[in-house]
Image (tube, rainbow, N blue to C red):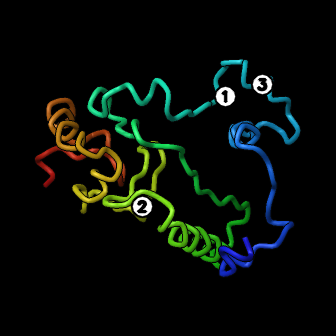
Amino acid sequence: MQQSFPQLGLVKEDCIEMSWIESTVYFAQFPRNTSLDVLLDRSPGSTFTAYGGKMDEISETSTPFPHRAGNLFQIHYAVFWGDQDSERSQIYTSWIRKLYSYMTPYVTKNPRQAYINYRDLDLGMNNLARIWGTKYFKNNFDRLVHVKTKVDPDNFFRNEQSIPPLSSW
């Protein structure tokens, strides 16, 4: 990390080295050193995201989730902090934005993409729905706007990055 991303200022104590499968257990918030056998239990809270294989065979337009064929892996950027100190929050937010920026040469572009269940206000909000919508949903965005317009024309179910109905444009 020091050679590739010295700007991050990471030290060994900031990092936990683990395999990809161990990170699956970690991000499911199981305690450290939990057996990988926990992944065999399909109870709520256990998540497993795989790309390739069968996902490559499912059309981008079959479901709202278009990120299928050609995707090698998913990168999940996250920063966690417990204190409510505004200054510390700004430091952590700045840190993750820099990391996101540093990774630009290594990830998809035109558009840079994100998966819907991860709110990422840096990608945009409803006032720029077309821009962030295509980052989340690619070519499915227009179809989803039409569904939203039929199902929820008054936009009752909304947040900063929900699909907007046509009436809100």
Alpha carbon distance from label 3 to label 2: 33 Å
- Contact (Cβ within 8 Å) of mark 3 with mark 1: yes
Quadrant in which residue 82 is drawn: bottom right
Q: Quadrant of the N terminus?
A: bottom right
Q: Quadrant of the C terminus?
A: bottom left
Q: Which residue is mark 3?
A: 38
**Residue at 72% across, 76% down:** 3
Q: Residues within 10 Å of mark 2 (few under 14, many from 20)?
A: few
User: What's under tag 1, amino acid-wise?
Assistant: Ser
Q: Nearer the viewer, mark 3 or mark 2?
A: 3
- Placement of 58 over or under 16, stated as above or below: above
Q: Which residue is mark 1?
A: 46
Q: Which residue is mark 2?
A: 121
Relative horizontal placement of residue 135, taking residue 108 as reference (left or right): left
Q: Residues within 10 Å of mark 3 (few under 14, many from 20)?
A: few
Quadrant in which residue 31 is drawn: top right
Which of the two discs, 3 and 2, labels the residue nearer the N terminus? 3
Relative horizontal placement of residue 158, taking residue 39 as reference (left or right): left
